[in-house]
């Protein structure tokens, strides 16, 4: 599925939630934390500034990012793959 976000939106594939705790306890699906890390799949053209210029996004396809816990809108493809569309300003950091 191809998707092109508009403006300063970014499409993210959330990373999988941890299956085990550091102590080795296996977590059931209901106890897993919602992931706050993901991989950038697509980016928009950038933010439209008041003077009419477009500020290009700081992130690029393939970047691993950290985003706010309740950021964005989730959606699933027909194949069951989960994605998130968020504004670039909701991205907290790029993981290097």
Image (tube, helix red, strand yellow):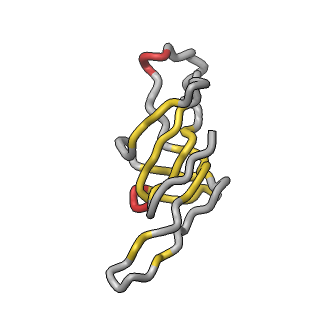
**Residue in the picture at 50% in, 51% down:** 66
**Residue in the picture at 39% in, 48% down:** 68
Q: Which of 68/13 is in front? A: 13
The image shows residue 6 at horizontal and vertical percentages of: 46, 58
Q: Is residue 64 left or right of residue 85?
A: right
Q: Is residue 12 above or below residue 55?
A: above
The image shows residue 50 at horizontal and vertical percentages of: 32, 81
Quadrant location, the N terminus: top right
Question: Which residue is outermost to the bottom?
Answer: 51
Quadrant location, the C terminus: bottom right
Q: Is residue 96 above or below residue 23?
A: below
Q: Which of 92/27 is in front? A: 92
The image shows residue 20 at horizontal and vertical percentages of: 58, 22
**Residue in the picture at 54% in, 39% down:** 14
Q: Is residue 52 left or right of residue 5?
A: left
Q: Number of marks in the image?
A: 0
The image shows residue 59 at horizontal and vertical percentages of: 57, 63
Q: Is residue 62 left or right of residue 94?
A: right
**Residue in the picture at 46% in, 34% down:** 75
């Amino acid at each position: 599925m191809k998707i092109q976000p508009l403006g300063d939106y970014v499409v993210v594939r959330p990373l999988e939630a941890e299956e085990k705790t550091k102590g080795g306890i296996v977590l059931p699906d209901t106890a897993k934390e919602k992931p706050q890390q993901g991989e950038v799949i697509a980016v928009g053209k950038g933010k439209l500034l008041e003077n009419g210029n477009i500020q290009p996004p700081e992130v690029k396809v393939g970047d691993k990012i950290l985003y706010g816990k309740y950021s964005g809108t989730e959606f699933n493809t027909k194949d069951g793959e989960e994605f998130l569309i968020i504004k670039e300003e909701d991205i907290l950091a790029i993981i290097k």
